[in-house]
Image: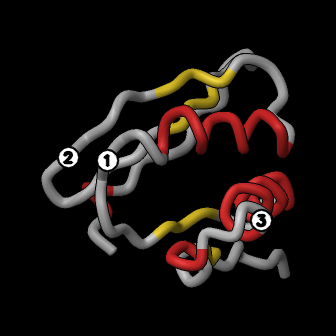
């Protein structure tokens, strides 16, 4: 680890912003600001409105293990019977606390 590249975390007075976006090797899509709490219906809506129409072509779909994401992806890909998308959804393992 190079100490010149390590900076401490600075806590601020709260607040924050949650956004969703997508990109590929040669394309960057619009960033979408999420207002309030995101549930599986909101995430499903974001995927339908922004991910699919973005036209990225063949992609590898990645996300974390948030249950909201899993439920939305199942609803979007599996329940609609899109066989081409069945193998695209997989998750990135979350670090487990010690």
Secondary structure under the numbered disc 3 in the rendered image: helix
Q: Which mark is residue 91?
A: none
Residue that label 3 marks: 74
Mark before the other along the chain sequence, 3 or 2: 2
Residues packed near mark 1 inside 10 Å, few (<14), some (14 to 19) or many (20 plus): few
- The residue where tag 2 is placed is 27
> Measuring 83% from the left and 38% from the top, which residue is drawn there?
41
Rate crowding at label 3 as few (under 14), some (14 to 19) or many (20 or more) other CA atoms within 10 Å.
some
The residue tagged 1 is 55
* 69 or 83, nearer to the observer: 83
What residue appears at the point 79 percent right and 58 percent down from the top-left corner?
75
Q: Return the x and y of residue 89 as percentages of the image width and height.
A: 60, 73
Q: Kindly indicate whether the residue at mark 1 contacts the one at mark 2 (C-beta within 8 angstroms).
A: yes
- Of pointers 1 and 3, the one earlier in the residue sequence: 1
Marks 1 and 3 in Cβ contact (< 8 Å): no
- Mark 2 or mark 1, which has the lower sequence index? 2
Looking at the rendered structure, the secondary structure element under dot 2 is loop
Give the Cα separation between the discs numbered 1 and 3: 20 Å
> Picture quarter containing residue 60?
bottom left
- Closer to the camera, 38 or 78? 78
Please tell me whether mark 3 or mark 2 is closer to you in this view.
Answer: 3
User: Residue pushed farthest left?
Assistant: 26
């Amino acid at each position: 680890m190079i100490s010149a590249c390590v900076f401490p975390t600075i806590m601020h007075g709260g607040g924050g912003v949650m956004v969703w976006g997508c990109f590929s090797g040669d394309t960057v899509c619009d960033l979408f600001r999420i207002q309030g709490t995101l549930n599986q219906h909101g995430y499903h809506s974001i995927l339908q409105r922004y991910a699919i129409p973005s036209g990225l072509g063949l992609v590898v779909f990645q996300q974390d293990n948030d249950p909201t994401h899993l439920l939305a992806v199942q609803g979007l890909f599996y329940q609609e019977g899109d066989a081409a998308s069945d193998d695209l959804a997989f998750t990135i393992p979350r670090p487990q606390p010690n």
